[in-house]
Image: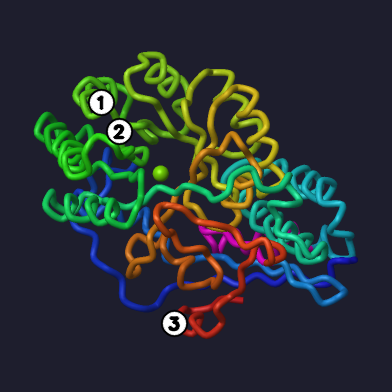
Amino acid sequence: MKIKNIRTRVVQWSGETAPLPPHFCTNPMDLLQLPQSSMKTFAFHGWLIVEVESDDGLVGIGNAALAPLVTKQVIDHYLKPLLLEANPWDIEFLWQHMYRHTMAFGRKGIGMTAISAVDIALWDLLGKAAKQPVYRLLGGRTKPRIPVYASRLYSTGLGNMADEAQRYCAQGYKAMKLRFGWGPVDGAEGMRHNVDLVRTVRQAVGDDIDVMADAYMGWTLDYAKRMLPLLEPFHLRWLEEPVIPDDVRGYAELKSYGRIPIAGGEHEFTLYGFRELLQANALDYIQFDTNRVGGISQARKIAALAEAFSIPVIPHAGQMHNYHVVMASLNSPMAEFFPPVDVEVGNELFWYIFQGEPKAKDGFIDLDENLPGLGLTIDEERLLQFQVTE
Ligand SMILES: [Mg+2]
C-alpha cells in the first residue's frame, strides 16, 4: 500500500452561533481586561479535515481544530511531500520524519497539530486496510463500554446550571464538568460567584455524582491558591487547567497541597512535554488531546508513560481519535463527552462535520467492533453550511 494523495480542507462555520454571555468561561485573555468579550478569542468555528488516500482506494480521515488555516499550510507545504509514495504501515518512521523535518519550527503548537491530524488519518487508513477498528491495532478492548462525563455547564446563571446538571443526571451520567466564570481581575466578589457555581451544581446532583470544574487557563497560581480552600468542601473530582500550560511549577505546587486533584494537559504536546509534567509531579489527571499531542502515534506512548506513573489519562474532547486510545488503555477510566448542541464555542462543531461519532447513552459510549478504522465519515451534505477552503 502506498500513499497516493493528501487532501486538506478547512471548513468555517457560516451559520448562526449562540451568543456567549459575559463570564461564560474564564480564559487566558481575561487578565488583559480588553473591552470586547475575551471568550471570542477561544471560539473555534473552523476545523481542518485531512484525507489520506492510498493507491488501493482507501481513505483515512483525520482532523484538527487549532488555527486550521495555518495548520493546513503546514501539511500542504511541509508534510505532504514527505508522505506521498510512502508505505503508511511504516507509520512510526513517517511520524519521526514529520517531527524531525519540522523540528526547527514545529515541536509544539501548530506544527504538532498538523502532524497530529495527518497521523490520525494514517491510523484510520491502517484500520481500514486491516479491516479492524483502530482500538484493536492499539491493544484491543479493555472495558465493555467507555464511561463518559458530560462536559458543558458553562457559567450561564445558577438556575440554568442547576437544570442542566439535573438533566445530565436524568440522562444517566455519573460525572459532569462545569466552567468557572470569574478570575483574578474579578476580585473577592468573583471568587464568591465561582464558589456559587460549584455549590449550585453539587447541590443539584447530590453527593453520588462526580463533579469537576475547569478554569481553562484563566487563573493565576496566586488566585488558584486562594480558591482551593474555598472549593474543598464540594469534593471536586478535579480542578482543571487552573494556571497557564507553561506554568508547570504552578501545577506542581497546586498538586502538592493534596486538597483537590489537579488536571491538565490539553494544551501540552508530545511525549517530551508529558515527561516534564510527570517528572515534575504536576498532574493528577492527564488530558492530552490526540489531535494536538502528536496523533495516535504519540498518544499511545504518553498513555504508556502515564501508566508507569499511575496517573490516569482522560483525554480532552472525546471524539473518535481519543475514544480509540481510551478503549485500548486500562489506565483511561473515562472520557470527556461534549453533548451535541447548537453551534456555540465551536468545540461542538465535529458533530456537524462527521457522521459516526458515538452518542452517550446512560453515561457511556461504545465503539462498534464492525467498523474498520476510526468509524467516521465526512458529512459532505452538512459541509454546505460551511465555507470551505481547499
Ligand atoms: Mg478543558
Q: Earlier in the sequence, mark 3 or mark 2?
A: 2
The kind of residue on which mark 2 rests is Trp
Tell me the residue at 60%/22% (across/down): 309
Q: Report the side of 153 relative to 173 (left or right).
A: left
Q: Secondary structure at mark 3?
A: helix
C-alpha separation, residue under disc 1 versus residue under disc 3: 42 Å
Mark 2 neighbour class, 10 Å CA radius: few under 14, some 14 to 19, many 20 or more: many
Q: How was this image coloured?
A: rainbow
Residue 78 found in image quarter? bottom right
Q: Is residue 21 magenta?
A: no
Residue 321 found in image quarter? bottom right
Mark carried by residue 223:
1
Q: Secondary structure at mark 2?
A: loop
Q: Secondary structure at mark 1?
A: helix
Mark carried by residue 219:
2
Mark carried by residue 385:
3
